[in-house]
């Protein structure tokens, strides 16, 4: 979801002229109308939150079904919120109103024929989405507290303001940092357009991505409020497994989420700036073997080079799609049309491309990491052994239990049995199953991951076959992107490719 949301906000911040409202009206009336739309959306969110809280209070014995219903609604609302914001930009004229009201004076833009949006004005264009997202955090706080607490440890959960800033910090790191970099660059080019073709600016833009990937993890402990993992027994086990599989890292961290998230992650490409992070809820609810399996999964991402591969894949994909659009633009004059959708076509194509290709790639990498995680509790597994030789049925079962625990703790469990009642129930089930899959499109659903691991227990060599096939896929994908970039580069010229960065 963060990648799709990132692409969505990059489209909103693109240097295009957003259309005016479909009905001819003034800027103040347009802003007022969009404000009314936001108020109606907030009332709609509150009605859903009220209904969920009522179910939690009235039917405490049905808490699992209520949690599933709540998670389904949150998935649906996340997509609905993006659709709503898109309609505000394309139909009700919010982007047009900002671009025509928040402009620089004429005397400071002598090179321009008309006034331009002031630097940082894109933040006002995407302000409605901030309000949509922030209001959802505040409104659904009571639901989150009721679900996590379940009548216990109520005082340990976040306060409402604490929960808001907890979510905001995640949004800041995962989404707003790259969006902010784009906003800064576009604002700089608006007041100094000659810098767009300066070689040192183009080189700086190209180098900013790897620099960000290398040094960003060093700021995460401060931004996310991470603390060193100090539980001696757990830390000793984790250090032993990390040493056994050759993982170089800087520290193990505990992420205090006040029980709102059960997850783990490894961040950092360079060992000096690499951290392994476990949330408090994961540590508190998993047994030692399950925690070991989760660490093995995270080590799998590092040993298979997934972080570096993702960076290369995304960089090459952006260059190829942007270059291809520039090639088509030179021959067919796409930018000469007045349709704003054609101006954002590269980013829209990139979003669809990421959803399909990156989604498949990411799900395959998660399967690789799952198979590697099975080595953590296997006495025969070591760094260089084949997958089938390195795992045992007990080690696979430890990871399966860990995955099922994570699914239960995060309220992601979904019954796979198709209802055999009315047509209406079947339609509702299909809709919920689609939303459940969309909420896990990057990692695959826990049900599918567990089903594959159970298959590996019966057919261990299936793991080796998958590893070979997926390695060839990753290699072929990179070679295809490199070949496409080289071909377009010789056609357009490498200076044009560098300018697109």
Image (spheres, helix red, strand yellow):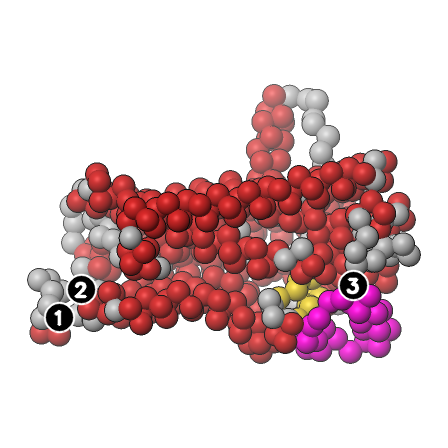
Q: Viewer-proximal residue, 275 or 462?
A: 462
Numbered disc 2: secondary structure? loop
393 in the magenta segment: no
Q: CA distance from mark 3 to mark 2?
A: 55 Å
Numbered disc 1: secondary structure? loop
Which residue is tagged 2?
116
Q: Is residue 123 left or right of residue 329?
A: right
At x 89% / y 45%, what residue is drawn? 393
Which residue is tagged 1?
109
Examine the image and state in which quarter residue 294 appears. bottom right
At x 10% / y 68%, what residue is drawn? 111
Q: Earlier in the sequence, mark 1 or mark 2?
A: 1
At x 54% / y 65%, what residue is drawn? 170
At x 51% / y 40%, what residue is drawn? 356
Q: Report if the CB atoms under discs 1 and 2 are less than 8 Å apart.
A: yes
Q: Earlier in the sequence, mark 3 or mark 2?
A: 2
Residue 235: % across, % down:
81, 73
Q: CA distance from mark 1 to mark 2?
A: 8 Å
Q: Nearer the viewer, mark 3 or mark 2?
A: 3
Q: Which residues are magenta?
A: 226-254
The quadrant in which the C terminus is found is: bottom left
Position of 227 relative to 89 (above/below): below
Numbered disc 3: secondary structure? loop
Which residue is tagged 3?
245
Q: Report if the CB atoms under discs 1 and 3 are less than 8 Å apart.
A: no
How many numbered marks, from 0 up? 3
């Amino acid at each position: 979801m963060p990648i799709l949301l990132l692409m969505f906000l990059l489209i909103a911040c693109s240097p295009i002229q957003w259309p005016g409202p479909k009905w001819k009206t003034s800027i103040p009336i347009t802003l007022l109308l969009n404000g009314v739309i936001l108020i109606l959306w907030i009332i709609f969110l509150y009605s859903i939150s009220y209904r969920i809280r009522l179910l939690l209070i009235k039917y405490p014995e049905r808490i699992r079904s209520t949690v599933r219903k709540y998670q389904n609604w949150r998935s649906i609302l996340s997509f609905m919120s993006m659709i709503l914001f898109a309609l505000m930009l394309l139909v009700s004229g919010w982007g047009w109103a900002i671009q025509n009201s928040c402009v620089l004076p004429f005397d400071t833009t002598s090179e321009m024929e008309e006034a331009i949006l002031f630097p940082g004005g894109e933040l006002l264009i995407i302000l409605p989405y901030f309000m949509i997202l922030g209001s959802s955090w505040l409104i659904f706080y009571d639901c989150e507290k009721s679900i996590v607490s379940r009548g216990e440890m109520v005082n340990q959960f976040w306060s409402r303001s604490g929960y808001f800033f907890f979510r905001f910090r995640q949004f800041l790191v995962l989404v707003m940092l790259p969006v902010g970099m784009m906003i800064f660059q576009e604002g700089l080019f608006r007041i100094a357009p000659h810098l767009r073709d300066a070689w040192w600016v183009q080189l700086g833009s190209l180098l900013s991505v790897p620099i960000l990937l290398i040094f960003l993890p060093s700021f995460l402990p401060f931004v996310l409020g991470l603390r060193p993992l100090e539980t001696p027994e757990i830390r000793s086990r984790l250090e032993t497994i990390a040493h056994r599989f050759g993982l170089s890292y800087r520290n193990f961290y505990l992420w205090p989420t006040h029980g709102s998230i059960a997850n783990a992650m490894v961040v950092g490409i360079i060992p000096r700036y690499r951290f392994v992070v476990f949330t408090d809820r994961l540590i508190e609810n998993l047994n030692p073997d399950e925690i070991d399996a989760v660490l093995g999964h995270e080590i799998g991402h590092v040993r298979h080079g997934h972080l570096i591969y993702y960076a290369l894949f995304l960089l090459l994909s952006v260059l190829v799609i942007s270059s291809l659009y520039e090639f088509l633009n030179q021959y067919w004059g796409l930018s000469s049309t007045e349709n704003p959708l054609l101006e954002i076509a590269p980013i829209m194509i990139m979003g669809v491309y990421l959803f399909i290709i990156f989604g498949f790639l990411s799900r395959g990498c998660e399967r690789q990491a799952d198979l590697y995680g099975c080595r953590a509790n296997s006495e025969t597994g070591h760094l260089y052994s084949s997958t089938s030789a390195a795992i045992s049925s007990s080690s696979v079962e430890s990871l399966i239990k860990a995955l099922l625990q994570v699914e239960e703790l995060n309220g992601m469990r979904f019954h796979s049995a198709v209802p055999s009642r009315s047509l209406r129930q079947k339609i509702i089930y299909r809709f919920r199953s689609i939303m459940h899959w969309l909420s896990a499109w990057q990692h695959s659903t826990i049900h599918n991951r567990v089903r594959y691991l159970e298959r590996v227990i019966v057919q261990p060599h299936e793991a080796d076959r998958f590893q070979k096939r997926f390695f060839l896929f990753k290699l072929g994908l990179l070679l295809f992107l490199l070949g496409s970039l080289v071909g377009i580069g010789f056609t357009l010229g490498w200076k044009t490719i560098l300018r697109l960065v």
